[in-house]
Amino acid sequence: MESLHSEHASRKINGQAVWQALANSNAPLSRAELARELGLSKQTLSEIMGLLERAEWTKTAGHKQGALGRAAQSYEINPDAGFVLGVVFEGEQFTMGLADMRGQIRVKKSGRLTAKALVDGGALGEQLIHLVQGLIADSGVKTSAIRYMVIGCPGVVDPVSLRVHHSPNLTSLQNLDLKRVLADRFEWPIFLHNDLNLHAYGEYRYGCSQNTSSSVFIGLGSGIGMGIMLGGQ
């Protein structure tokens, strides 16, 4: 977490654990609840919450009445602390959206790629840049608030070069250095992944398989594909 980069490694790890616990919770949590769940001392948790609040990663969410004593302050993640921009290609179709820290989509857009973008990498890059700029303008979100951009590609994504191979439904992606093209225009980190793997993770994290440890996602569209989650991976 950015606010903890200069802190001791253990504090950074604990800070990430606290934030993740708040992100995974369906309701605000008090410091006592977080301390019990994560096994942290009250002093350590107090220091971490102070850092997270000052960096606006978390915010107060009212009070909780315990069995004894006065009501305790409760906390939740600040959904406006950052945003993730996602794009998925499926043949000539695209879907893109901007989601907040709670995973809630703030704005979404779908459409078709131009005939030239389907076969020419340069045209694909330019259209994608134009679409991203339009989506951000529609959302009203500041560009500086976007933390990451993730692109789901129909093909095999090289984990090192992030170039796409074997993409018969969108040949303009093949061997295109799309990350470099986008990095020349945008400052946030950019990740490319296979689209079906992203769909599988999305269902595991937010959809019908979120209460399971393993699941299979099968996609039927311009082609057929499969993504598998095993033990949360």
Image (cartoon, grey):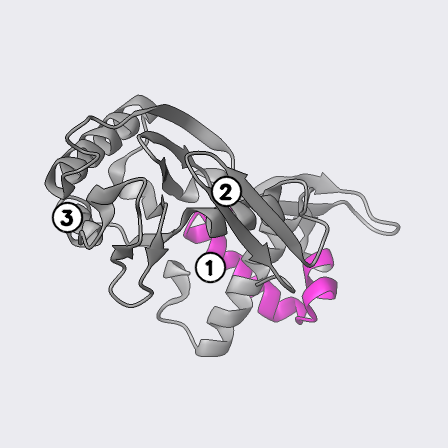
For the residue carrying disc 2, how many other residues have a C-alpha within 10 Å: few (<14), some (14-19), or many (20+)? many
Q: Is residue 89 left or right of residue 229?
A: left
Q: State the image coordinates of residue 148 (x, y, percent, origin top left).
A: 34, 49
Q: Nearer the viewer, residue 34 or 62?
A: 34
Mark 3 residue type: Val
Relative height, residue 15 to residue 208 (above, below): below
- Tell me the residue at 53%/52% (across/down): 227
- Tell me the residue at 44%/28% (across/down): 106
Quadrant in which residue 223 is drawn: top left
Relative height, residue 156 to residue 199 (above, below): below
Label 3 element class: helix
Q: State the image coordinates of residue 211 (x, y, percent, origin top left).
A: 72, 50
Quadrant in which residue 171 is drawn: top left
Q: Which residue is mark 2?
A: 78
User: Which label sits in the foreground, 2 or 1?
Assistant: 2
Q: State the image coordinates of residue 168 (x, y, percent, origin top left).
A: 30, 45
Q: Is residue 31 left or right of residue 196?
A: right
Residue 41 lies within the magenta run = yes
Q: Is residue 211 left or right of residue 151?
A: right
User: Which label sits in the foreground, 3 or 1?
Assistant: 3
Q: Which residues are magenta?
A: 33-59
Mark 2 residue type: Asn
Relative height, residue 127 to residue 206 (above, below): above
Q: Which residue is mark 3?
A: 181
Q: CA distance from mark 2 to mark 3?
A: 31 Å
- Tell me the residue at 29%/27% (across/down): 135
Label 1 element class: helix
Mark 1 residue type: Leu
